[in-house]
Image (tube, helix red, strand yellow):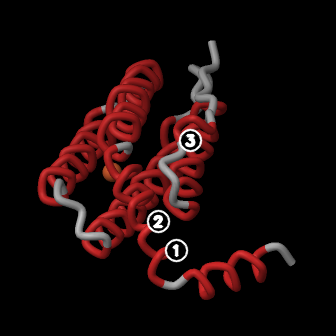
Amino acid sequence: MAKSLEWNDEYCIGDDVIDEEHRNLFILANTIFQILNPEEEIDKIRPLLYKLYDYMKYHFDHEEAFMAKIKFQEFVFHKIRHSEIIDEMNTIMKSSHQISVLSEKLTEMMLKWVLKHILEEDFKMKSAIKILQQHREQLNPAAVLIEKTIQTF
Ligand SMILES: [Fe+2]
């Protein structure tokens, strides 16, 4: 049976770019799930797995740069969790030679590692982002208003 992951806006942490990247991770995983059936050849799926892997790395690098920028206090711990997820993804790609095993491991990866990570760890950035936004509005209300006005066009 085909699996899919449904994005929910409640998963948003409050930064448009990071939220968009999280959404894209779901889209990429769903693209793989759609073709993960027993008749498919695993070699056809590999390029998509690499794409998901590369996007994960790209997103984690971006998220880490963002955490450094906002001086997020759990930065080091969070970075370690990212590298654990990448290691897990590496193991899946190297060891799964059967579609059924790959399907099971990828589902577990997306739910237990990626979604759990977004909801438990990325969510901790939510309050930091909110404080930062409030701070900006207090420091420079005119600039924030101009920015909001431009975005409405
Ligand atoms: Fe993260």
Residue 124 vs residue 138, the one in the foreground: 138
Residue shown at 53%/57% (left/top)? 21
CB at mark 3 closer than 8 A to ligand 1? no
Check disc 2 and report its element: helix, strand or loop: helix
Q: Which residue is mark 1?
A: 137
Horizontal arrangement in the rendering, residue 109 relative to residue 43 (left or right): left
Determine contact: label 3, label 1, CB under 8 Å.
Answer: no
Image spot of residue 56 (x, y percent): 40, 55
Check disc 1 and report its element: helix, strand or loop: helix
CB at mark 2 closer than 8 A to ligand 1? no
Q: Callout 2, which amino acid?
A: Gln
Kindly identify which numbered label has been placed on residue 48. none
Residue shown at 19%/45% (left/top)? 84
Q: Which image quarter: residue 148?
A: bottom right
CA neighbours of label 2 inside 10 A, class few (<14), some (14 to 19), many (20+): few
Classify the position of the N terminus by image quarter: top right
Classify the position of the C terminus by image quarter: bottom right
Q: Is residue 145 above or below residue 36?
A: below
Q: Callout 1, which amino acid?
A: Glu
CA neighbours of label 1 inside 10 A, class few (<14), some (14 to 19), many (20+): some
Kindly identify which numbered label has been placed on residue 26. 3
CA neighbours of label 3 inside 10 A, class few (<14), some (14 to 19), many (20+): many
Nearer the observer, disc 3 or disc 1? Answer: 1
Q: Which residue is mark 2?
A: 134
